Image (spheres, rainbow, N blue to C red):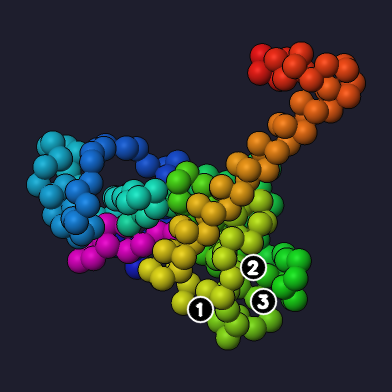
Amino acid sequence: MPYNKLGELVQEVKAENYEQIYFGLLEDNKKTYQLRKDLEKQIEPGKKLEVGDVIVTNREGLAVSHYVDTDTLLTLPGFINLTDSDAVIKVDTEDYEIEQYPGKWRSVDYLIFEGKSYFLMENQKYGKDAAALVLNQYGKVILDECKDGFDQDTIDRMKSAVQKFNEQEKQKGAIKERLSVWQKYFINGEYLRSAEMAEE
């Protein structure tokens, strides 16, 4: 049914309440509305794309969900939820305190990039009058000074920041591994044997 007629049923528009009926490769330059037209024609009888269905696209690691409405496609930020049990930030997080950023923060939007959730956090006191932040699901600040939500500029900056953050985490992991080998050296008294044990 059209999105504006869902009422209470809007809460049920979640991935777990849907069944995947089509999967394919998305052409780089194809717009989502063009994809909708193609899917309305191509899907086999009985599995035709209709109002109330959801199209999920993944472009360069960024997953976006679209509700198929009567005349348009509506973005559904909460359709897929990949937040794991160790996450400190979730879709409904409120009163969250962020080190070096005064006040309390709440999540107002999120997106999925490379299989991980990133949350747009808004200051609860100032709302849209203050710049938002992007945090990963573990509460790490990925990006600050976000003025227009997840617009294209914010997404591009976020992709770059995530790549940099991941590289730093890899380097930290490599340093920790080297330190653990040296620690074993001091315990065992033989560096080469310790390094071989670490490799095993």
User: In the rendered view, does 126 fall on the left or right side of 116?
Assistant: right
- In the structure shown, which secondary structural element does the residue marked by tag 3 occupy? loop
Report the residue marked by disc 2.
106
* Mark 3 vs mark 1, CA separation in Å: 15 Å
* Mark 1 vs mark 2, CA separation in Å: 15 Å
In front here: 98 or 123?
98
Report the residue marked by disc 1.
147
Report the residue marked by disc 3.
124
> Would residue 33 be visible to someone looking at this image?
yes
Residue type at mark 1: give it.
Lys
The outermost residue toward the bottom is 129
Q: For residue 81, which numbered disc appears in the image?
A: none
- The magenta region covers 67-77
Q: Mark 1 or 2 closer to N-term?
A: 2
In front here: 136 or 124?
136
Q: Mark 3 or 1 closer to N-term?
A: 3
Q: Which residue is drawn at the image coordinates 75% and 76% (left, top)? A: 102
Q: Which residue is drawn at the image coordinates 53% and 74% (left, top)? A: 146
Is the N terminus in the top left, top right, bottom left or bottom right quadrant? Answer: bottom left
Residue type at mark 2: give it.
Arg
Q: Nearer the viewer, mark 3 or mark 1?
A: 1
Q: Nearer the viewer, mark 1 or mark 2?
A: 1
Q: Which residue is drawn at the image coordinates 79% and 20% (left, top)? A: 191
- Asked whether 76 falls inside the magenta stretch, the response is yes
Residue 183 vertical placement versus 32 (above, below): above
Residue 181 vertical placement versus 116 (above, below): above
Label total for image:
3
- Asked whether 30 falls inside the magenta stretch, the response is no
